[in-house]
Amino acid sequence: MTGWRSAANRLHTVPVTDAPLPTNTPETHAGDEPTWWRHGVVYQVYPRSFADANGDGIGDLEGIRSRLPYLRELGVDAIWICPWYPSPLNDGGYDVVDYRDIDPRFGTLADAEALIADAHGLDMRVVIDIVPNHTSSEHPWFRAALAAAPGSPERARYIFREGKGENGEEPPNNWLAVFGGPGWRRVPDGQWYLHLFDSTQPDLDWTNEEVRAEFDDIFRYWLDRGVDGFRIDVAHSLTKDQTFPDLELSDDILSSEPVTARHPHWDRDDLHDIVRRWRRILDDCGRDVMMVAEAWVSPERLPLYLRPDEYHQSFNFGFLVTPWEHDSAFAAIDRAVREAAAVGSTPTWTLSNHDVMRHASRYGLPIGTNWRTWPLTGPADLLDAQAGLRRARAATLLMLALPGSAYLYQGEELGLPEVWDLPPEVLDDPVWENSGHAQKGRDGCRVPLPWTVDRPSFGFGDAEPWLPQPDSFGGLSVEAQRGAPGSTLEMYRAALAERSAHMCSDETLAWLDLGDDVLAFRRGSGAVCVVNFGPTTIELPAGQVIVATTDVSDGLPTDAAVWVLPG
Ligand code: GLC
């Protein structure tokens, strides 16, 4: 049984197909209107781990509200709040029970409205998560489906099928769940339902008009409450090949990429009709709202999601998975810039989020290390934490100089490392169990934030946090770094302040040749960003240093970045 473990290793693979790219020259999304998301900096809040105002060890909306001034001071344009809906939290809230309410552990609908109003008062936008591929198994629809008979309208909202084998005892096909294990689960009357993630996350049937109409209404519901955008979870799923064919599953296929062309449940052409429908709802609302796709697809396919009547933006995971190496970084950036421009969008840049190892640790591992399995397999001394932080800071300065928008993940402004050595008994991510303990999962990037230097919770809240924080968090806390020259927090604040002045005047980028292993480009304002991937210190271009990741008085050292205004 190695197959399903391999599936877990591929949490979010990158399917490739040979479909043609859009070749038209569509108009831009917003015409010539300035629109916030084209170059906005969006700060991702993972509510459970941001700030706990009511002292139950779990972050909440009041906690977020109380820290909005901090985010304003940091200089971000918007916050993206991960799912805040009622949920058993089997998958951190990506298992939704009610899409029109707030989990009582996080607060109330009134708190959400107050949070949106406060954020707007501070000139920050609010983006929320929509999870359309699946609900929680505790959603009233799924409860009704279980209570109803095979073939009923209640079952038709999900993907129930008869099994194979003499008595239907085999799953309908061999699809696997992303978190590990089979993608189907049998219910007492013998039918099976599809769940591409945890078995408590049944997939909805998007061929069913009732499902489509329900989500139309959910979008309108939150637009009416003033949200400014939506992050669409697992945007590359939704539709499935209605013949439900077996996948060719061999370990070879599972562990190598590209996976297959024309995948039966990822990145299918027919999902785009649904996206267009959502887009019309957003366009009709009369405000400058946006939606961003979480689409783990190949770079060749990404532009399809960005056509003018589809998503405004998509996460560019090609950049996130690029190793700390000059040629790879150049290729990832150059491609993303050109492709977004071709469809009138702007590129997005992300280095960390709630699903991946924090970049301060990822960049400290040798290139090629599997950072999903390394926390378990080690060896521990592969990690060079200092180099990781150096590179993470340089990568951030590089990212913030690029045209388009940047998505920051809470705590990266503190240079937080991955807490990769959490003891198994505290692990909460379903990946740990579902992978048969082959991967620890994603808890290491979800450890509650340190706000102050002292224990017990480093200012997170009055109770013991839901995941333990390491001792090192005190020295990395906001209190420890605020006002401290050279701190990661101050570097982020400086970069965000200078970014609006120097990196957002237009959407162009001109590459400069400043030598091997040096990535350098000029933005429309004239400001130049230089990153040194090489082993030796290099000379800085002449001009005024605007922001740097380190002391550059003797040149730009290895793994450092700088913004210079030639003069
Ligand atoms: C997305 C989320 C991830 C979640 C999964 C299933 O990839 O980012 O956290 O586990 O979808 O909803």
Image (cartoon, rainbow, N blue to C red):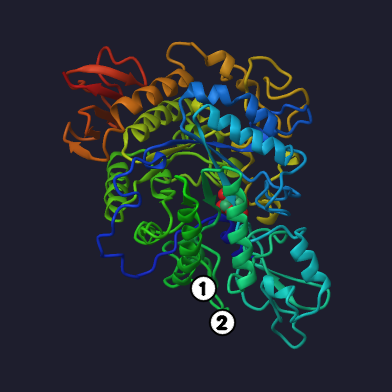
Point 44% across, 63% down: residue: 15
Q: Is residue 550 above or below residue 182?
A: above
Res. 256 image quadrant: bottom left
Q: Which quadrant is the N terminus positioned in? A: bottom right
Some atom of ligand 1 lies within 8 Å of the CB belonging to the residue at label 2: no
Give residue 243's mark: 2
Viewed as shown, does residue 437 lie left or right of 252? right
Q: Is residue 50 above or below residue 339?
A: above
Secondary-structure class at tag 1: loop
Viewed as shown, does residue 461 lie left or right of 283? right
Q: Which quadrant is the C terminus positioned in? A: top left
- Is 530 or 425 nearer to us in this picture? 530
Q: Are marks 1 and 2 in contact (CB under 8 Å)?
A: yes
User: What whole-number distance in Å separates the C-alpha atoms at marks 1 and 2?
Assistant: 9 Å
- Is 320 or 123 nearer to us in this picture? 123
**First in sequence: mark 1 vs mark 2:** 2
Give residue 264's mark: 1
- Is 299 or 116 nearer to us in this picture? 116
Whole-percent x, y for residue 207 in the image: 58, 74
Point 22% across, 23% down: residue: 538
Some atom of ligand 1 lies within 8 Å of the CB belonging to the residue at label 1: no
Whole-percent x, y for residue 464 in the image: 77, 27
Whole-percent x, y for residue 515 in the image: 17, 32
